[in-house]
Image: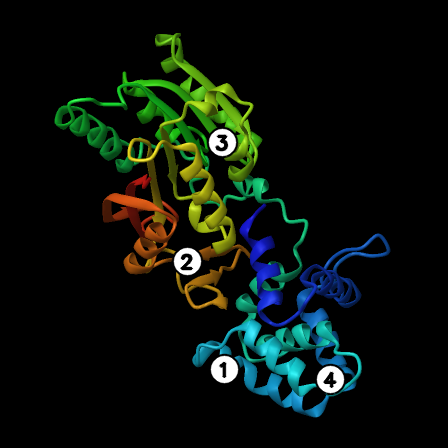
Amino acid sequence: MPANFTRRRDLFLDAGFSDAEQAIALLYEDAEQLGLVGTKQGVALGIEQSMERAAERVDTMLSAPVRHLLDAAPEWIFERGGDLATLLWLARNLDQSEKFHLGALVFGLASRMWQRGFRRETAAMIRFLVAVDFDYGALYQEAGIAYGFFQPRDPNPLAWKLLDHVETRAQNMASDRLEHLHVLELGCGIGNDALGLLSSLRTASYVGCDISRIALDEHLGRVKPLLDERPQLAHSLIEGDFVSALADRKNAMLQRLNLIYSYSSLHYFSSGELAEIFKLVHEVLEAGVGLFCFAIKGKGSIWDGEGTALYRPDVWINYDGQSRWFPSRTSLAAMIDRHGFEILLHEWHEHWGYSEHGKRDLFHYVICSPRA
C-alpha cells in the first residue's frame, strides 16, 4: 500500500478521529460535491472554481471560532511550523455544533491557502488527501514527475560498495556464511542495480520486486544477456508490494535469502509501514549473518522542502501529491537501532541528476545486519 494511504489514515488518527477510514470517506464525498474529483454524474471542475465553492461553504457550515482559526492557518502552517493534524484537533475542540463538518474545514483551509498564493501547495494537499485511486505505477509514464525512472544507468555506487563489503568480510572471517548470495531487491525498477548485483559470481539467486509491471518488463530485457551468460543463476520477479514479498513463506527463492537490497524506495513509506518492513527483514535474515543494504534520501535532497510539511516536519507532501520522508543521519540511525539492527556502514553520498537533471540528492548509504 502506498505511503499516502497510511499517512492519511495516521493523520486523522492523530487528529483524534476514532474512525479514520470513515473520515476519509466523508472527505471524499465533499471533494465530489466541490468538483475536485470526477463522479459518474459529472467531471471534475477546475481547482479555482472548486476553491470558490469551498470558500462559500465556510461561512454557512463552520462556527465563528473555527473560521478565525482558518484565517490564521496559512501563516501558522507555512511560517510557524504548524501541521494539519493539530489544526484538525483544535478545530474539533473549538466547534460546539452537534455535527462537525470535516469537508468544510479541510477545503476551507485549502481555499484560504489558494487565496494567499500557496497554489501548488494547495493542489498537493488535495491530491494527498483525496486521490484515493491514484495509480503510483503510472508514475513511470509521467516524465515530468518520474524523472529518470526509465533511464538506463550504470549500477548505483551502493551496489559496488556492498559487493566490496562482502569480499572484505570473506577475507577477514575464517568462516564466511555469505559465500553464495541469495538476493531480494525491493524496488528493483528497470534493473540498473540488478546488473551490478548479478555480475558478482557470488550471486546464486536474485528476486526483484516492484509495483510497476512496465518497469519489470524493461528489467527482463536489460538483464537477459547477463542471465544468458550464467544459466545456473536463478532469477525471478515479483509484481507487488514489499510487505507481501517479505511475508511470502511459500516462495522457495525467498526462503534462503541472505541479502535484501533497496535503493531509493524506503522514503515512500510511512513510519508504520517501515516498522513492518524492518520487522519482516529481521525475521527473514539470519542474525549476524544476513545483510540489509539500502539507500534512502536524506535531509537536503531534492523535494525536501518542496510542497507542504502537513504530515510532520520531516515528511513533505510534494507537488506530485506523494509524501516522502527525508530523515537526518541521527533519526535514521536511531530507527535502525530501534528495529534491532547493527549498523555496519552508514555514509552520506551526493548523487547528482538522480531525481532531476543537474540537481543534487543526498543519500544515506546503509549496510546493517539483524542482531540476535
The circle drawn on residue 62 is 4
Q: Earlier along the polypeptide chain: callout 3 or callout 1?
A: 1
State if disc 4 and disc 3 touch (CB < 8 Å).
no
Q: Amino acid at mark 1?
A: Trp
Q: Are marks 3 and 2 in contact (CB under 8 Å)?
A: no
Instruction: Classify 10 Å Cα crowding around label 2: few (below 14), some (14-19), many (20 and above).
Output: many
- Is 332 or 32 nearer to us in this picture? 332
Q: Which residue is mark 3?
A: 209
Q: Is residue 25 above or below residue 293?
A: below
- Residue 28 image position (x, y, % from top left): 73, 61
Q: Quadrant of the N terminus?
A: top right
CA separation in Å, label 3 and label 1: 41 Å
Q: Residues within 10 Å of mark 1 (few under 14, many from 20)?
A: some
Q: For mark 2, what is the residue?
A: 303
Callout 3: SS = strand
Q: What kind of element bears circle 4?
A: loop
Q: Earlier in the sequence, mark 4 or mark 1?
A: 4
